Image (cartoon, coloured by chain):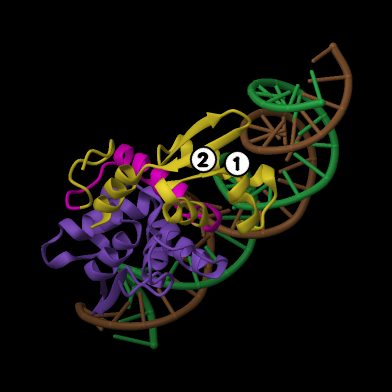
Chain colours: A purple, B yellow, C brown, D green
Amino acid sequence: MSIDCCPAGLTAPLDRAGAERLARLLKAVADPARLQLLSLLKASPGGEACVCDLTAPIGLSQPTISHHLKVLTEAGLVNREQRGTWVWYSIDGQRLAELSAVLA
Amino acid sequence: MSIDCCPAGLTAPLDRAGAERLARLLKAVADPARLQLLSLLKASPGGEACVCDLTAPIGLSQPTISHHLKVLTEAGLVNREQRGTWVWYSIDGQRLAELSAVLA
DNA sequence: CAAGTAGATTGACGTCTGTCGATACGAGTC
DNA sequence: GACTCGTATCGACAGACGTCAATCTACTTG
């Protein structure tokens, strides 16, 4: 696990700073809309999708979707790539796996 | 994985209801104090500890610790057992592993 | 039963967060 | 350059959340 908060996961007592770093990451995931976004990306071919394809299935306004994508991007769980007019987001599977490993 | 929200984890698109259930679980974990509590429990012999041993290392007031333990208990991540005057909390490692598996 | 102690509950407070409408920005197209 | 369309940012608002001091409850012991 190379996550930047807690080399030993939860198996060793966590200090406040490490706990806050890990909590920030988990908070990024702990939201229904963002979980739906991640699942949509993960289920998409190549693990990537255009924003235009992500807005409709979730049923939230476009600015809100944009906001959630930003949160995921800043957490490093998702990557952003502009292609002409459209923006494609792709899931960072390894980072998600690392996050998962911390809890295990 | 037997978590009650999303049989396929994130590999299939999540509907709103499943996403909300999973988010509730993740929110229970996505807090610095609760992560510290989990790590303390996990690092304790037998995965259990008395509340009296959990309060000091975290540096928050006793009611606040009690509140966080309640959140973890209601999420099913931790079990509560009264032994005379003291209350012992133990970590539910399997449930935590299941939660971890959803993200993987 | 009285006193002491461990833990839970209540009530209040400030802060953070998700959401939207309105608007701005940027890249293609005519 | 003007227009269009996809995406991001801004400002505002309601509701959720973490925290504490004060209080309450339950168990043990004298």
In the rendered view, tell whether residue B84 sits above or below residue B19. above
x and y percent of residue A36 in the render? Answer: 29, 51
Residue ranking furthest to the left: A45
Residue A1 falls in image quadrant:
bottom left
Locate residue B40 relative to residue A59 in the image: left or right.
right
**Secondary structure mainly formed by the magenta segment:** helix
* Residue A99 x %, y %: 33, 63
Q: Is residue B82 left or right of residue D23?
A: left
Can residue B75 be seen in this snapshot?
yes
Q: Which mark is residue B67?
A: 1
- The residue lying toward the viewer, choosing from A10 and B32, is A10
Residue drawn at (55%, 30%) of the image: B83
Q: What span is colored magenta in the figure?
A: B11-35
Disc assigned to residue B71: 2
- Residue B79 in the image: above or below residue B104: above
Specify whether residue B88 is painted magenta. Answer: no
Q: Amino acid at mark 1?
A: His
Residue type indicated by callout 2: Val
Q: Identify the residue shown where x is 22% and y is 55%.
A: A40
Quarter placement of the N terminus of chain B: top left
The answer to whether the residue labelled 2 contacts the one labelled 1, judged by CB atoms less than 8 Å apart, is: yes
| Callout 1 crowding tier (Cα within 10 Å): few <14, some 14–19, many ≥20 | few
Q: Which x, y percent locates residue B31?
A: 51, 55
The numbered mark 1 sits on a residue in which chain? Answer: B
Q: Where, by quadrant of the figure, is residue A16 drawn?
A: bottom right
As drawn, the label of residue B96 is: none
Could you tell me if residue A55 is visible in this image?
no
Q: Is residue B22 magenta?
A: yes
Q: Secondary structure at mark 1?
A: helix
Position of the C terminus of chain B by quadrant: bottom left
